[in-house]
Amino acid sequence: MTTRALPAECPLEDSPAQKLSRRSWMRVMLGAIAGSCAAVLYPVFRYLTPPQDFSVSAAEALAASVGELAPNSGKTFRFGSRPALLVRLATGEYRSMSAVCTHLGCTVQYRPDAKQIWCACHNGCYDLNGKNVSGPPPRGLDNYDVQVRGQDIYVIRKQAA
Amino acid sequence: MNRVMRVHTWIDERLDFEDLLTPLCTKRVPLHRHSAWYLLGGITLFLFLVQVCTGILLLLYYRPTPSEAFESVQSITYHVHFGWLIRSVHSWSANVMVLCAFGHMFSVAFARAYRRPRELTWITGVFLLFLVLGFGFSGYLLPWNMRAFFATKVGTEVAGQLPVIGHSIMVLMRGGEDVSGATLTRFFGLHVVILPALAAGMVITHLWLVQKFGTSVPTSVEAHWDVNPTERKEMRFFPNFFLRELMCWYLVLGSLICLAVFFPWELGTKADPFAPAPPGIKPEWYFLAQFQTLKLIPSHIFFIDGEVLGILGFGFGAALLLALPFIESGLGDRGRRTVRIGILIALVYLAVMSVVGYVAK
């Protein structure tokens, strides 16, 4: 077996300026590994986070038609991607609010016997203005405006002041 | 040498698997008045295997989309040959597995089998219990019925209440702001790929640790044996204990089939994301205690929302459970007794709240 001599311009030992200590080499390598992991994991993490759902915040929705709801009854309907509640009071007046319970997100319903809005999941109760009155809900329901246009009843999200 | 022996020798020459089986033959199981509790871990393992087999069979017909999930489970139940049996066995086995996993955990806790050197066996066991609960939670959304829909809505909202990271976790679990078809596909992936892979690795680690450290003896029995060494009794694991375990597995399988035949698992009504939660809606029995706790906590305690406090409490309980061997290791006899009373109180609390949750309207 023959060995090849190193050319003179390629010394065996690095000059002090070029010398890379074991510690700094490890540091560079760990940095490179961490960088590679981040480069792989970041797109995966972003992929797992779903894109923004713009339908959540629809401005208005058709809730019902005039005459569909008897006095002292309620109806849940789709408002954007969330359920909302339309209530016709015994006086004939319409009220509307979010149907998503502020406790843990179940869908609430109108109880004609108690004249209250009730969540069946954890027994939370709200009055007809959407204010939490008993049970675990920490806040009231978001209220919406109701507009009757011809034979249709529209519910409109209140504009932030 | 017959053909079977020749195959055996051929494999053994290459893999040396006689060495792998030797520990099973030399393993001994202590015999005392609490020995029956040793069977529970094996029964839980058997139920996990039943889940894997029936789960694979259900996968052949199940379709994980909001428009087809409920219909496909309906078709499995009413049209596929023995589909009703496979589905009911899967559901019953899941519930019995949770029961056995809890039973195994409490028996280990009361026997203080987690003490040195078995701390890691305990930790892997607690992680397996969390995985079993994860299987339950992700599995019951899959039929896409009303109960499943609202249980998932509440369960993911619970995660969303965690301070700082809660909302991101909720969106990650749901695949959006709300429970939808995206949640169904995520839970399906979790239930049939991610959790089984994690559980398989954890089961292997747990069994390896059980094998490595041998079977623990309760402290009271150990103390008695130390005084009376002649009363120490053991049984060979293979075949003696193994055959007893096998008999239990056979009885459990028979019971599962009876339950599936006489009490078939209900299907409910298809989920409607815009319908109100039906009156009397409740989660599965193993989440009833948490459900009832969340129902009873007032809306605000000082300046914190009640549900946030409840959820932090559950997290604290889970952390205490994991850290049990380390909490106990530095304590004297009196401290250990306090820990045991604490475990008993936890058990009574879970049982009472589950019963109250079950009977409450």
Image: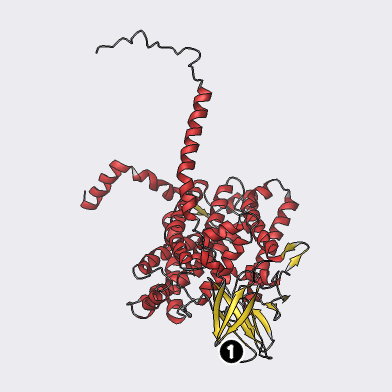
Q: Is residue A37 above or below residue A139?
A: above
- Which of B361 and A108 lies nearest the eye of the viewer? A108
- Which of A65 and A75 lies nearest the eye of the viewer? A65
Residue at image position (45%, 69%) is B142
According to the picture, the residue beneath numbered tag 1 turns out to be: A69
Residue B103 on image: x %, y %: 57, 64
**Left or right: B357 as drawn, with respect to A39:** right
Subunit under mark 1: A
Q: Is residue B15 above or below residue B3?
A: above
Disc 1 crowd rating (10 Å Cα; few below 14, some 14-19, many 20+) is: some
- Which of B313 and B305 lies nearest the eye of the viewer? B305
The C terminus of chain B, quarter of image: bottom right
**Left or right: B199 as drawn, with respect to B154:** left
Q: At label 1, which amino acid type do we have? A: Leu
Q: In this view, does B12 lie above or below B141?
A: above
Is residue B27 at all visible to an observer of this figure?
A: no
Residue at image position (56%, 57%) is B169
Is residue B117 at all visible to an observer of this figure?
A: yes
Residue A28 on image: x %, y %: 50, 29
Residue A157 on image: x %, y %: 61, 72
Residue lying farthest top? A8
Residue at image position (29%, 41%) is B14
- Which of A145 and B237 lies nearest the eye of the viewer? A145
Q: Answer with the quarter of the image where residue B237 lies.
A: bottom left
Residue A17 on image: x %, y %: 50, 14
* Numbered disc 1: secondary structure: loop
Q: Is residue B44 above or below residue B227?
A: below
What is the tally of numbered marks visible in this picture? Answer: 1
